[in-house]
Image: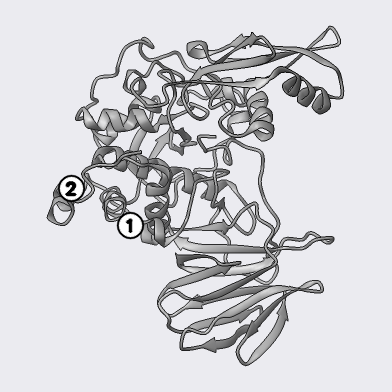
Amino acid sequence: MMLYGLRRLGVALALLFATAGANAPDTAEYVRVRLFSGKLISSVDVSDAAGKRLTLYDSSGALATLDNAQKIGFDVWNEFLRARWQSGTAPMDRALIKSSSGTVTVDIGGESRSYHGSLELTLDGDIERPGLVIINEVSLSDYVSAVLPAEYGFPEPEGMKALAIAIRTYALRARSEREGAYHLTDDTGSQVYMGISAETDLARAAVEATSGMTVTHDGQLIEAVYSAHCGGHSANNEDVWSSRPVSYLRGREDPYDRDAPVARWTSSVKKTDLLDHFSRKYASTVKDIDVSERGSGGRATMIMLDAKGKDVNITAQSFRVAVNDRFGPSAIKSTFFDIEKKGDTYEFSGRGLGHGVGLCQWGAAAQARKGRSYRDILSFYYRDVEIEGYESDFQVTSAPLADAGLVRPDPEPADRVAPPQQEKPKQTRQSAPKQAPKPKKWTQSDRGESTSSGRLSGRRAGW
C-alpha cells in the first residue's frame, strides 16, 4: 500500500507525538519471543550485530567470550544442542547469548535478522527430528517498536498510537497467561516481529508517546485482537472463534472501513476440488456446501456440509482455514462471505480481510485522518474499556475468551458512530490480591516445548 507523509520527521515528530500522560516506561518490562516460529531449524549462526563482544553461557555460567565480530554456530548433535566457535565446541542443554552492544544477529541459511536483547537456544523436544528453538528476550519498548510497522502500514500519528497500545496490551496479556520458555511467537500466531530492520522513527515515536499505556476492562488487560479490515462491520468474538461472548469484543457497523481497497472481493474454486478436499477431510462423501448460519452484520458463522444426505455443520472460520490451507490464503479473505454455485465452480464473494474481531486497522487509519484521537479509536473498537498506564501489580490473568462472562447489552445502536469521548479522570486502583505471574528467568530446568494453549491468544492475525 502507498504510504505518505513519511519524510516529515525530525522536529515534526515531537509535535505529532506529544505524549498524552503515559506514566510507566516500557523498558521496565520485557517479553520472550520465539523466533522463526513454524520452521524446522537445524543450525544457526549468532553474532553481535555491532561487531563487538559476544558472551556464551551454559547452565554452569559463562563459557566463552568472543571479540572481533566472531560468530557462534549452533546445531543438533546427538541429543544435545552443540555450540561451535573459533577456539572450541561444547554440547549443552541450553545456551544463553548476550552481546556487549545489546543487539544480536541471527543467520539461518542466509536469512539474517538482528534483534535487541539477548538470545536463548535449546532443542524442541522432538525425538525423531529435533530442531532448534530460538528465543529473543527483548524489552517491551523494543518489541512494540518492531511489531508496529510490521503490522500497521499507515503513518497517521493517532492511528499509530492506538495500534502501539493494542500491541503492548496483547503482549503483556500473553506474557501473563503463558507459562514456559516463551510468551509469543514472531508470526501471525501472535504478532509479526521481524526485529530491528522493521523499526521506523515514526513507530518509535508512537511507542514512546504511549509508553506504559494499555487497554483494560474491569481491571484486566483485554485480549486486544485486531485485523486488517472488517469489511464495514466488525465481528463478535463468538461469531469467529468457538468461545463465549466477551463484552468488549462486540461487532458493530464501521463506516470508517468502507473505503478500504479490498472492501469487496471475489474468488472461485473448482467444485470437484473443493468437495473432494472436504470429503477427504471428513472421511465422507460431501455433495454440497453452503452457509447455514450468520452472525453480526451478516457475517457467516456456520457452514453446512451435505455429507451423504446428512448435514455436518462446522464454523465458518474452520471452513475458511481449511479452504485457505488447500487453495491459498486469498481463497477466502474473511468470514464475511457468500457462497454461490456457478457452473463447475463455487464462487466466494465477500468483504474485509482477516477475522474482523476487535480493532480494524483500515478503520483506525480512517478515523485518525478524520481527527479522532487514539482514545476515540480504541474506545470505538473495544467496548467499555479504560486506557491507562500499566501497573505491574495488576491482576491480569483473566479467563480466556472461552471461559469469559456473558455479553453485556450493547451500549449504543450499532449503526451510530460513537462521538469523540472525553478523557475520564484518572482513577486510583487497589492492587489485586494476587499478583500476575512474573516472567520466568533463565534456569537450567526450563524446557523449550511449545506452550500454545488454544486460547484466543495465538489468533491475533488478520489471517
Which residue is drawn at the image coordinates 38% and 42% (left, top)? 152
Using a 10 Å C-alpha cutoff, classify the residue at mark 1 as few (fewer than 14 neighbours), some (14 to 19) or many (20 or more): some
- Please tell me whether residue 154 is drawn above or below residue 286 in the rendered image: below
Distance of mark 2 from mark 1, alpha carbons?
15 Å
User: In x, y percent, where is residue 326?
Assistant: 69, 33
Which residue is drawn at the image coordinates 50% and 43% (left, top)? 396
Q: Which residue is mark 2?
A: 18
The amino acid type found where label 2 is placed reads Ala
- Please tell me whether residue 115 is drawn above or below residue 359 in the rendered image: below
**443 relative position to 47: left or right:** right
Q: Is residue 423 visible?
A: no
- Please tell me whether residue 100 is drawn above or below residue 383 in the rendered image: below
- N-term mark: 2 or 1: 2
Secondary structure state at the residue bearing disc 2: loop
Q: Which residue is mark 1?
A: 25
Given residues 441 and 241, the one toward you in this image is 241
